[in-house]
Image: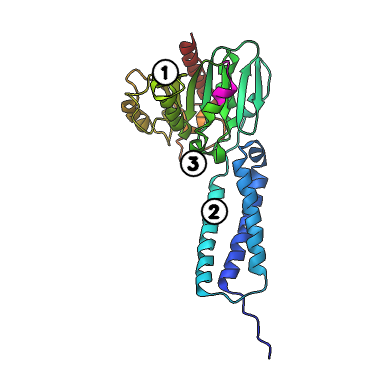
Amino acid sequence: MSTAPPARTWDDITAAVVATLGLLLVAAITASTWDALVHAHPLYPVLLVVTVLVCVWVLWRSLARPRERSRGRTIWRVVCIILGAAWLALMLWLVPMGPEEPAVSAMDSGNGVTVTETATSITLTPDGEAEATGLFFQPGALVDARAYAAIVRPVAEVGYQVVIPKQPAGIAFLSVGAFESAVDSNPTVDEWIVGGHSLGGVVAAIEADANDHGSEAEGGSANVAGLLFYGSYPADNINSTLTAEVLSISGTEDGLSTPAKVEASRELLPADATFIVIEGASHAYFGDYGVQSGDGTPTISHDEARQQISEATVDFVNALAR
């Protein structure tokens, strides 16, 4: 007498639904952010490919002939379903914010600057003989590195090498070794100004503190002359260890690195740190990537804010280089 096959269980159905949603999610991310994915650090696109492969496998397993399953295996599948849903939420959260004009046009070589893009960095090199000082700039979290091309390009236009790393998955803490790579790849640069926007500034502070002129005895590279914050501040107190010059540029309408937070960071920085406040500028005005959730409402034009930020940056680099 034949035995009827076991019925498909609710966890099979749930796993199939989650896997299908995962495939649809990756398809939507790819269609809406294709340009950003092409220009991103390889990690996030690889994670999306892995997500597709796992979802296809789970979908195949869930729709295959039902099998008897022990209670322990059922519990394990439930755990995997929960972890899978959390993974899809992470993939959605990691979607990068792509560049807008004039950052896109600033990626073109010309007018005295050659732009070189690799899988892990963007380098703006002045034509002719460059100065011995360079700028290494960390992007904000989940922001396409190209979004900062326009705001820092004036530094390259006046003769300084500029390097913008592409952060793995758009997280600055995952690119802590990028500065050392930039130093090795640019041997003609004798000293660096390390800067960053938002979370990128937090990591820049760590890099500057470990590599500034006063860190040689502790094994640092001793080649960082300046630390530059765009709407950012350090996570820890570095006022007694950092010898590099510091410039903090912030906006009065920044809803994320608020004026109160920037003001409080004075206690974490050397007493001679310089603070410049751009009246009417928001957090997203320190790059060109559109509106950012949680940000304030700007009261000046983006072009005006960008010009003020760029001019202050060039002045800071000039003062340290000469």
Position in image of residue 107 (x %, y %): 65, 26
**Labels 2, 1: front one:** 1
Of labels 3 and 2, the one closer to you: 2
Three-letter amino acid code of the residue under disc 1: His
Is residue 242 visible in the rendered structure shown here?
A: yes
Q: Specify the farthest residue to the bottom.
A: 1
Q: Quadrant of residue 84?
A: bottom right
Residue 320 image position (x, y, % from top left): 46, 13
Amino acid on which disc 2 is placed: Trp
State which region is magenta: 182-188
In the depicted view, which residue is nearer to us: 163 or 284? 163
Q: Secondary structure at mark 3?
A: loop
Which mark is first along the chain, 3 or 1?
1
- Is 40 drawn above or below residue 10 in the view shown? above
Q: CA distance from mark 1 to mark 3?
A: 38 Å
Residue wearing tag 3: 293
Residue at horizontal 49 percent and vertical 15 percent from the top:
317
Disc 1 marks which residue?
213
Residue located beneath label 2 in the image: 87
Q: CA distance from mark 3 to mark 2?
A: 22 Å
Label 3: how many Cα within 10 Å (few below 14, some 14–19, many 20+)? few
Residue at left offset 37%, top offset 20%? 273
Earlier sequence position, callout 2 versus callout 1: 2
Query: Could you say which is closer to the camera, residue 34 or residue 4?
Result: 4
